Image (tube, rainbow, N blue to C red):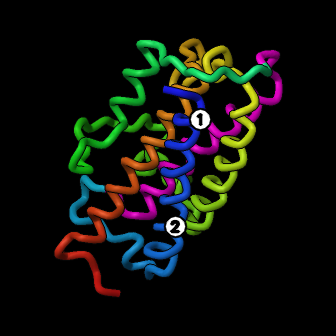
Amino acid sequence: MTTEQLLSINKNITEESIEWVQKKVISLSENQLNWRPNPGYWSINEILAHMNSYASYYYEAFDQKIEKTKFRNSKEEFTSSPLGRSAWKSMKLGNANNIKRKFKAPKTHNPTFDASLVHGDEAERFIKWQTKLLQTLDRAGEVNLKKVKVPISISKMVRLRLGDALLFVSYHVERHMQQIKNLQKHPNFPKK
């Protein structure tokens, strides 16, 4: 894939997510934001808190790596590493916008284990983080997405190519946005 295609995928997912939250989530009541179909599921607020937790790690890491890299020459083509491809493909939705594989969130990013992740203004925080990502994506086009490496959140020893890491976080957001949409379509979702 080209660098332009990769950045375009990221921008589209990010812009669509911001738009959905602005139109369909930000005006929901506290009851709706905190509703769960059963105790094993996350509420909309918890899903947003989870995404915000990942954003606070990855988006800061992206900015630091872009700022400090010596690999300033952008390349036309981007090639994923086997690990990177596996990471973002595991997050990517299926053809029917279905979640193909379920994962357990690490405790540090799981609002069920760490209630301090939920601040009460999750939708606003989400929009701020995604807006920050759009700015980062503009700057990412100025560096080599294959040479710049980003440590993953669960192990600083394992690093992904910046292009792979960008796809991973965008597909992660897309996946959880679908989770929010599924909650809102649930027959028992509160009317207000």
Residue located beneath label 1 in the image: 4
Q: Amino acid at mark 1?
A: Glu
Question: 96 or 177: which is nearer to us?
Answer: 96
Left or right: residue 69 versus residue 84 is right
Q: Is residue 145 above or below residue 54?
A: above
Q: How many marks?
A: 2
> From this viewpoint, which residue is outermost toward the left?
187
Can residue 10 be seen in the rendering of this structure? yes
- Observer-nearest residue: 176 or 12? 12
| Residue behind mark 2 | 19
Label 2 crowding class (10 Å Cα cut-off): few <14, some 14-19, many 20+?
few
Q: Is residue 93 above or below residue 106?
A: below
Q: Residue 139's x, y, as percent?
A: 75, 38
Position of residue 75 measured from the top left corner of the image (x, y, whole percent): 66, 20
Q: On the rendered structure, is 16 left or right of 126?
A: left
Q: Quadrant of residue 41?
A: bottom left
Residue type marked 2: Glu
Q: Which residues are magenta?
A: 42-71
- The location of residue 114, given as percent across then percent down, is 49, 47
Q: Is residue 113 magenta?
A: no
Residue drawn at point x = 54 percent, y = 52 percent? 14
Task: Compute the Cα span from label 1 to label 2.
Answer: 22 Å
Q: Quarter of the image for the C terminus: give it.
A: bottom left
Q: Residue at x 38, y 79 (%)?
A: 31
**Picture residue at 51% right of the left edge, 55% below the top:** 49
Q: Secondary structure at mark 2?
A: helix
Mark 1 or 2: the one toward you? 1
What's the mark number on residue 55?
A: none
